Amino acid sequence: MPRHHRPAPAAFVGNTPDEVEAQFYEALRRADLERMMAVWADDDDIVCIHPSGGRVVGMAAIRASFDGIFGNGPVPAVPEQVRRLQWVGGALHHLVERIDIPAEGGQTQTAWALVTNVYVKTPQGWRMAAHHASPASLQEPPGPGDAPATLH
């Protein structure tokens, strides 16, 4: 339950978790901080874990983290292999992010991160409550249902 409720900018209404996710990835690809922050729930306990990063909690801290990331330019992340779980008032998406990174000689190198996004239904519509991305790997992860060679 939000402790401090401030509505997101009126320009964004998330009618479904899928719409919120689409706006999140559009904000990444455009390095658009205002669009990025509009998708988040206004709650003290929202959380973002960037690849190879620590836990970032709360609207101000998440905003500062994306401001720093966007200072390096857009993030060319594309969601793939999206799997969805939804219940009354909440949704969880787990997916693979494909990130095409410019490399030497005009080539691109592809990296993948495993991601979990959590959405909550608010009076303003659906909003993101958590984004957790694994460290990116240059090795494409197995498809859904493929068992990894080693379990922890």
Image (cartoon, helix red, strand yellow):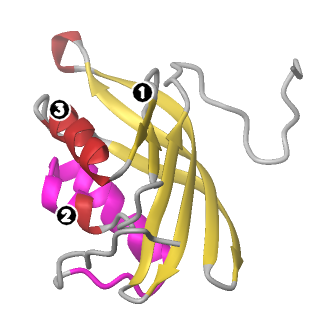
Q: Earlier in the sequence, mark 3 or mark 1?
A: 3
The vertical placement of 130 against 3, above or below, is: above
Q: Is residue 93 left or right of residue 57?
A: right
Q: Amino acid at mark 3?
A: Gly
Magenta segment: does it hold 130? no
- Callout 1: SS: strand
Location of residue 109 with respect to 18 vertically, above or below: above
Q: Position of residue 124 (x, y in %)?
A: 35, 87
- Of residues 137 and 5, the one nearer the viewer is 5
Q: What secondary structure is the stretch in magenta mostly built from?
A: helix
The reply to whether the C-beta atoms of the residues labelled 3 and 1 are less than 8 Å apart is: no
Measure the C-alpha gap from mark 3 to mark 2: 15 Å
Q: Residue at x 53, y 42 (%)?
A: 132
Q: Which residues are magenta?
A: 12-36
Disc 2 to disc 1, C-alpha distance: 25 Å
What's the residue at 89%, 22% (across, down)? 151
For label 1, the residue is 110
Q: Which residue is mark 2?
A: 35
What SS does tag 3 mark? helix
List the residue tagged with mark 3.
68
Amino acid type at circle 2 is: Arg
Nearer the N terminus, badge 3 or badge 2?
A: 2
Callout 3 crowding tier (Cα within 10 Å): few <14, some 14–19, many ≥20: few
How far across and how far down the image is residue 89, in percent?
62, 82
Residue 73, quarter of picture = top left
Q: Residue at x 26, y 49 (%)?
A: 28
Q: Quadrant of residue 10?
A: bottom left
Residue type of the residue flagged with mark 1: Thr
Q: Nearer the viewer, residue 85 or 144?
A: 85
Question: Mark 2 or 1, which is nearer the eye?
Answer: 2
